[in-house]
């Protein structure tokens, strides 16, 4: 036993010696490689790093040691493998990486710049329109009355605008290197506050007061590039993947001062002879290269946000399958975190996220703040205690005012100073929200020997000014800020991150990607043109077309129809442009790129498809119909039709931007096409047009194309035969249509169309540059007179007055409790599986993605069931499958309702599915939406005064239309006298009783129904006869 032990010790010592020798050799090799890197020029040196050879080619190389590489040439797989090697456990490894980065800079005396955000006496006001009653509901009558009211009161409204305060005299500091939580009840002004600090507020709002970053006012730099505002709404291009979305954002936001910092760091390390850690050096160099299409920073953001598993998944939207709601929220965060900014204003980032994912994201942000020195202000509605403990400072808002702004450790002491104490088992965040509420405040009053009276927001603010945290904040706020050079380096003074050419290339690349993703649209349009052109050829086939005056009209009609079809083939651009406007406005206002960088690639990439469509149409029609055989005339016709297609597409894009509401834009588009058609000179020839409308002919692109294409055809040699009237056939045909122009008119028409194309695209660019997103800066807020009076009286109250002294300030509403009759139903599911086809780019034969695997369970009546799981676990997919909302994929398994196999029609009557995405009609009120739903969903047994759906003034319409009586008679005659029992909505009834209770159909009314249905044609025939005899619209 002893000899064995000594042998093992000897072997171990030998191995240790060999390892030490290998380490020495490896260390010497690294030093030699690093010396070679240091001899490179600065530009190459900051792009060259030592890379572990195991990670090259995804670990296929077995050679140990490091290799000198150019970080700009790392492939997609190599970047992912490197990040996986760098960060395995997200929380621990990310903190380790950030600490190494900070230590490397501190070793040579460098510090990362920080941002200190201060605001003093900040006020935000909005103009509002005070109304009596409900004239703000957009009915036809209210619209007319509002117009007349505006005309009669225009002078008074202009002299005395009504204003409401959203933020009221708020002051405070958002400090760097500290996590600040913004708390407040919904409607207290948190979103406006965050947007104002980030310089992203609505231009129609009036902002007063002072906001400064490191002592610089907002007007002295570009706050949109210095800070990042993360919206609570997730707005992304549905056709792009998660990785492509973040890559494009990284490309547009640039690298900031990373390259300059890396140069200075490299210079100092070279001077001091310091060799950095290879992996850290590779990471810092890879994220400091400007203008890359794919960057390592994207893989880093995907990793720390937990998006690496869905990085190559399409984002999707309400109409197409994509990532989950929680993943979209993380994508919204990552889209802004990938940039170089170190000041973040985040609005409700926990919406759609589970508590575990929220905690993980906030933990990464805390590490960013504490280690790197980032300035982070996050608005959360109800954070969990674990997430709440991650924050350092609290800003508590109520009624547009800041109640508390200070350390989290002092907030309980402050409210105890005011007389309120958080119970031991109560979450502090919930306590802070409830203690400001009048109905919940009393339960936290801990001076039992004294009666409680409601403490208003103003009293809390006054108490905070006397509290030691409030006094310390006031001293810091009004002390002069010492501006250093590092403070200036943290700010951005340029609107855009790149030169114009780089921005253009970035937008061109993305537009080409989206064009490929929408290739089905262009293929379908081309196929439509092919089929339509074949139909046209059969109507105007060349074997039946002759060179005479009669067939000249057919040639001209065929030419004009082709022009009309080519013009209207650009109509899909209307919907395509409208669908992307929201994303464009978001990225434009964040200064990702200027409007021209979006419009020019959009126009350029439409040229090939425009040429393809025109070539298909012209090739099939030209030779099928039998136009002039000269080759040059074929190319002339092709060219001028191509220009018309371009002009039409540009005009439709312009309409989509100017008129941002898609239904209104579609109507205006239709009007434009009809107006162009009427003024083209084909329906009404130019000589027959009234003189006051002839100008429309000269501005119509269709008329200029008609001139050019007609001249090109009818002035060809084969139409130069002289007719009996001593005129050539071609000249005669042109003269009849009022197109008596010479050969040079073709080139004049071409020049005019090119000019129209240029003007339309310039207009498109200007509209993108100066138009505002829908709902911003266009209309004033509408407030009821009662609410406005209450707000104004509350502003005039002194701090000593109580809110309950306001008459009508707090109105009580009687709540009528009622339980609707229903039958308890159990939903059970057994071995449910859900499959979808594998995406084309990962196509594997006979392979499907298994999204739900062997799911079994039951939802019982009287039991409240919580469906829990991390973001992307499949919660929404399961509910979609159970509710029958999936329109694609393959569902297997047994789903039963009340023990019976699920039938979708019956299921929809007994279950309600509240989806994650809120989709409502924007033109109706909340009450009208609920009333409409009640009418459609509630049983006919529910009394009408409970359903409250169909307005009384529309009931008569049901009784006078023939369709309702036809359905009544048809159903009643077939089933109204059958007494066989059926199970309807969980109840056993006869068919006769079901028709009577659910639809109101009675078999005894069948005779009346027949009489009325006979009376309808007699009535309409009589009316027709009467008006035919009495009315005469003929004019002689």
Image: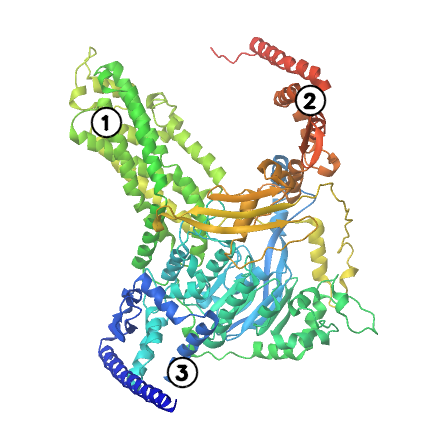
Q: Point out which mark residue 622 bears.
A: 1
Secondary structure found at label 2:
loop
Secondary structure found at label 1:
helix
Front residue (pair 1023, 990): 990
- Figure quadrant of residue 756: top left
Residue 780 against residue 437 in the figure, above or below:
above
Decide if residue 608 is in sight here.
yes
Which circle's residue, 1 or 2, is located before the other in the chain? Answer: 1
- Between circles 3 and 2, the one closer to the viewer is 2
Give the colouring mode of the picture. Answer: rainbow
**Left or right of 568, for residue 991:** right
Front residue (pair 680, 954): 954
Which circle's residue, 3 or 2, is located before the other in the chain? Answer: 3
Classify mark 3: residues with Cα within 10 Å, few (<14), some (14-19) or many (20+).
Answer: few
Per the image, the residue denoted by label 3 is: 106
Per the image, the residue denoted by label 2 is: 978
Residue 635 against residue 717 in the figure, above or below:
below
* Gap in angstroms between the C-alphas marked 1 and 2: 66 Å
* Gap in angstroms between the C-alphas marked 3 and 1: 75 Å
Are the two marked residues, 3 and 2, in contact with CB atoms closer than 8 angstroms?
no
- Figure quadrant of residue 932: top right
* Gap in angstroms between the C-alphas marked 3 and 2: 90 Å
Q: Quadrant of the N terminus?
A: bottom left
Classify mark 2: residues with Cα within 10 Å, few (<14), some (14-19) or many (20+).
Answer: some
**Left or right of 663, for residue 34:** left
- Figure quadrant of residue 286: bottom left
Residue located 41% across and 81% down the image: 103
Residue located 47% across and 48% down the image: 317
**Left or right of 42, for residue 444:** right
């Amino acid at each position: 036993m002893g000899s064995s032990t000594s042998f093992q010790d000897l072997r171990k010592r030998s191995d240790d010696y060999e390892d030490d020798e290998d380490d020495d050799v490896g260390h010497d090799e690294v030093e030699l490689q690093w010396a070679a890197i240091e001899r490179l020029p600065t530009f190459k040196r900051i792009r060259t790093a030592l890379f572990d050879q195991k990670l090259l080619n995804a670990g296929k190389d077995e050679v140990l040691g490091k290799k000198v590489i150019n970080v700009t040439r790392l492939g997609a797989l190599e970047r992912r493998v490197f990040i996986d090697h760098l960060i395995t456990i997200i929380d621990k490894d990310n903190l380790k990486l950030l600490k190494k980065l900070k230590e490397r800079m501190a070793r040579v005396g460098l510090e990362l710049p920080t941002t200190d955000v201060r605001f003093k006496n900040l006020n935000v006001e909005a103009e509002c329109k005070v109304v009596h009653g409900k004239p703000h509901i957009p009915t036809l009558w209210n619209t007319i009355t509002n117009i007349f009211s505006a005309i009669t009161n225009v002078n008074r409204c202009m002299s005395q605008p009504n204003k409401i305060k959203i933020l009221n005299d708020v002051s405070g500091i958002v400090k760097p290197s500290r996590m600040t939580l913004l708390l407040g009840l919904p409607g207290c002004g948190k979103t406006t506050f965050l947007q104002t600090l980030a310089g992203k507020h609505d231009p129609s709002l009036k902002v007063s007061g002072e906001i400064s970053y490191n002592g610089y006012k907002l007007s002295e730099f570009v706050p949109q590039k210095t800070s990042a505002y993360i919206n609570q709404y997730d707005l992304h291009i549905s056709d792009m993947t998660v990785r492509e979305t973040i890559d494009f954002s990284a490309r547009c936001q640039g690298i900031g001062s990373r390259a300059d910092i890396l140069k200075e760091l490299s210079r100092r390390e070279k001077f001091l002879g310091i060799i950095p850690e290879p992996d850290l050096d590779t990471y810092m160099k890879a994220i400091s290269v400007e203008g890359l299409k794919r960057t390592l920073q994207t893989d880093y953001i995907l990793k720390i946000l937990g998006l690496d598993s869905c990085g190559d998944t399409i984002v999707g939207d309400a109409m197409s399958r994509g990532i989950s709601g929680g993943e979209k929220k993380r994508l919204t965060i990552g889209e802004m975190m990938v940039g170089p900014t170190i000041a973040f204003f985040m609005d409700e980032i926990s919406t759609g996220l589970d508590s575990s994912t929220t905690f993980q994201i906030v933990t990464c942000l805390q590490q960013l703040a504490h280690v790197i020195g980032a300035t982070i202000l996050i608005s959360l509605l109800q954070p969990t205690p674990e997430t709440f403990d991650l924050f350092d400072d609290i800003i508590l808002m109520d009624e547009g005012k800041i109640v508390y702004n200070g350390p989290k450790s002092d907030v309980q002491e402050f409210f105890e100073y005011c007389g309120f104490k958080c119970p031991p088992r109560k979450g502090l965040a919930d306590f802070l929200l409830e203690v400001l509420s009048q109905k919940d405040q009393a339960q936290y009053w801990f001076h039992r020997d004294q009666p409680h009276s409601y403490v208003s927001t103003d009293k809390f603010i006054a108490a905070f000014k006397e509290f030691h945290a409030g006094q310390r904040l006031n001293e810091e706020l009004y002390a002069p800020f010492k501006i250093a050079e590092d403070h200036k380096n943290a700010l951005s003074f340029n609107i855009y991150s790149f030169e114009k050419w780089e921005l253009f290339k970035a937008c061109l690349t993305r537009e080409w990607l989206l064009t490929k993703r929408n290739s089905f649209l262009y293929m379908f349009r081309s196929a439509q043109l092919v089929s339509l052109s074949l139909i046209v050829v059969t109507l105007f086939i060349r074997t039946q077309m002759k060179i005479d005056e009669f067939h000249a009209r057919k040639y001209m009609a065929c030419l004009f129809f082709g022009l009309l079809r080519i013009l209207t083939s650009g109509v899909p651009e209307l919907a395509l442009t409208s669908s992307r406007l929201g994303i464009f406005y978001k990225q434009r206002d964040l200064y990702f790129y200027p409007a021209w960088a979006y419009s020019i690639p959009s126009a350029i990439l439409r040229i090939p498809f425009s040429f393809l469509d025109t070539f298909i149409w012209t090739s099939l029609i030209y030779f099928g119909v039998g136009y002039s055989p000269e080759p040059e005339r074929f190319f002339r016709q092709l060219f001028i039709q191509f220009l018309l297609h371009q002009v039409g597409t540009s005009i439709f894009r312009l309409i989509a931007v100017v008129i941002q509401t898609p239904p209104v834009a579609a109507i205006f588009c239709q009007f434009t096409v009809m107006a162009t058609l009427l003024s083209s000179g084909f329906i009404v020839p130019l000589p027959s047009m009234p003189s006051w409308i002839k100008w429309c002919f000269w501005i119509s692109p269709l008329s200029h194309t008609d001139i050019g294409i007609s001249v090109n055809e009818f002035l060809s040699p084969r139409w130069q035969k002289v007719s009996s009237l001593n005129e050539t056939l071609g000249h005669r045909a042109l003269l009849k249509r009022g197109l008596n122009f010479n050969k040079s008119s073709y080139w004049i028409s071409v020049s005019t169309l090119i000019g129209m194309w240029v003007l339309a695209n310039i207009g498109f660019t200007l509209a993108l540059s100066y138009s505002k997103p829908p709902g911003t800066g266009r209309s004033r807020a509408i407030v009821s007179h009662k609410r406005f009076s209450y707000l104004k009286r509350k502003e005039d109250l002194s701090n000593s007055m109580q809110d309950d002294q306001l008459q009508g300030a707090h109105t009580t509403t009687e709540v009528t409790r009622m339980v609707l009759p229903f039958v308890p139903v159990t939903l059970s599911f057994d071995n449910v599986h859900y499959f979808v086809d594998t995406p084309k780019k990962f196509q594997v034969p006979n392979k499907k993605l298994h999204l739900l695997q062997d799911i079994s369970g039951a939802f019982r009546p009287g039991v409240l069931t919580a469906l829990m799981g991390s973001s992307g676990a499949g919660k929404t997919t399961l509910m979609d499958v159970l509710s029958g909302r999936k329109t694609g994929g393959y569902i297997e398994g047994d789903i039963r309702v009340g023990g019976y196999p699920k039938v979708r029609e019956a299921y929809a009557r007994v279950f309600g599915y509240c989806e994650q995405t809120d989709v409502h009609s924007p033109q109706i009120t909340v009450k009208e939406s609920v009333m409409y739903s009640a009418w459609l969903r509630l049983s006919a047994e529910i009394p009408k005064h409970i359903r409250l759906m169909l307005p009384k003034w529309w009931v008569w319409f049901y009784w006078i239309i023939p369709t309702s009586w036809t359905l009544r008679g048809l159903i009643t005659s077939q089933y109204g006298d059958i007494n066989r029992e059926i199970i309807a909505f969980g109840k056993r009834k006869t068919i006769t009783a079901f028709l009577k209770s659910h639809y109101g159909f009675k078999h005894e009314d069948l005779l009346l129904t027949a009489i009325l249905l006979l009376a309808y044609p007699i009535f309409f025939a009589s009316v027709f006869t009467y008006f035919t005899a009495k009315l005469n619209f003929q004019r002689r």
